[in-house]
Amino acid sequence: PAYNNNLISEIKRLKKEKNAIILGHNYMEYGVQLVSDFTGDSFDLALKAMNTNADIIVFAGVYFMVEQAAALNPDKKVLSPEPNAGCSLSDSLPVDVLKKYKEMYPGAPVVLYINTSIYAKALADYVVTSSTAIQVIERINSDKIIFGPDINLARYVESRTGKKLIKVPPDGKCIVHANYTKQLVELARKRYPNAILMAHPESPLEVLEAADYVGSTNQMVKFAKDSPQREFIVATELGMINALKLKVPEKEFYPLVTTEACGCARCPYMAMVNLENIKRSLELEVYEVKVPKDVGEKAKEAFLRTMRLVG
Ligand code: 13P
Ligand code: SF4
């Protein structure tokens, strides 16, 4: 793909000069992944942020990810190149709604998907990723569990664990994955008869049931690397193809939905982060993300509780 070499060199120079690192989500555009010191999923990147000696962390991802890296690393300067890059799932769960559910179901454990604001996480008992959600729900000993905000992930977890979840909000969705259908899967399978299908659990249940593998973005990379298969249809946000091409260059990846087929292929929030605003972020040291200490500590505890539960 075409990208600006001067911009890339300048970003690399600034990183060195300022002892900064760039953490990039797997959905970032190709050039952003090239300048990133680490690429991965939101949880993995938050952990990476905790293990660096860098003075500055530029987080190339959407806001809830930057906020979470800041909460887990209160002593570091964590910068968001574009703080308006939100997430439809995170935005679907205002703190007031969560508080209401906690009042309606007193004592029910609250399990939140990582795609939530740090203020919601601070009210949760467990913060899960798509890779830990099933194990956590299996291990919680309660017949009433509040789970949010992704309705598709909730349905998938219900189908795998046999447990019924109280969904908060009742209809939280990712504006990218919610568009996938069984028909799209059938079309892609006809077009790429030698490929197997990997799907992200934010997709509707009918897609997950038709998939050969279901996993988070990091799990997809691992699956593709270890699999004897050579070709894969990828049912997740389009930027993931960049991560797969860079990390598993010997194999072929086809997106379930292309930009030509649907404006929904690319996450508009992820697309807001680019080489230009990363350079500005490094140059001017903007926009610093700070989380109130008590909020950050409560959210961190919900993470650690999850890690203790799933080992
Ligand atoms: P992962 O945690 O699997 O990288 O997913 C993040 C995300 O935003 C999915 O749309
Ligand atoms: Fe949020 Fe969906 Fe974008 Fe991921 S792809 S950041 S879940 S809107």
Image (tube, rainbow, N blue to C red):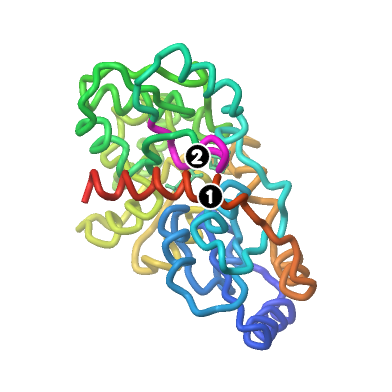
Q: Considering only order in the chain, which callout, 2 or 1, is on the residue closer to the N terminus?
A: 2
Q: Position of residue 34 (x, y in %)?
A: 56, 72
Residue depicted at x 58% and y 46%: 64
Which disc is residue 296 wearing? 1
**Count of numbered circles in the view:** 2
Q: Are marks 1 and 2 in contact (CB under 8 Å)?
A: yes
Mark 1 residue CB less than 8 A from any atom of ligand 1: no
For label 2, the residue is 122
Which secondary structure lies at badge 1? helix
Which stretch is magenta? 111-120
Q: Position of residue 25 (x, y in %)?
A: 52, 57
- Between the C-alphas of marks 1 and 2, the distance is 7 Å
For the N terminus, give its image quadrant: bottom right
Residue depicted at x 33% and y 31%: 208
Which secondary structure lies at badge 2? loop
| Residue 17 belongs to magenta span | no
Q: Amino acid at mark 1?
A: Gly
Q: Nearer the viewer, residue 148 or 256?
A: 148
Q: Nearer the viewer, residue 188 or 20?
A: 20
Residue depicted at x 28% and y 62%: 225
Which disc is residue 263 wearing? none
Q: Nearer the viewer, residue 162 or 290?
A: 290
- State whether residue 187 is above or below residue 158: below
Q: Residues within 10 Å of mark 2 (few under 14, many from 20)?
A: many
Does any portion of residue 12 appear in the rendered image? yes
- State whether residue 130 is above or below residue 2: above
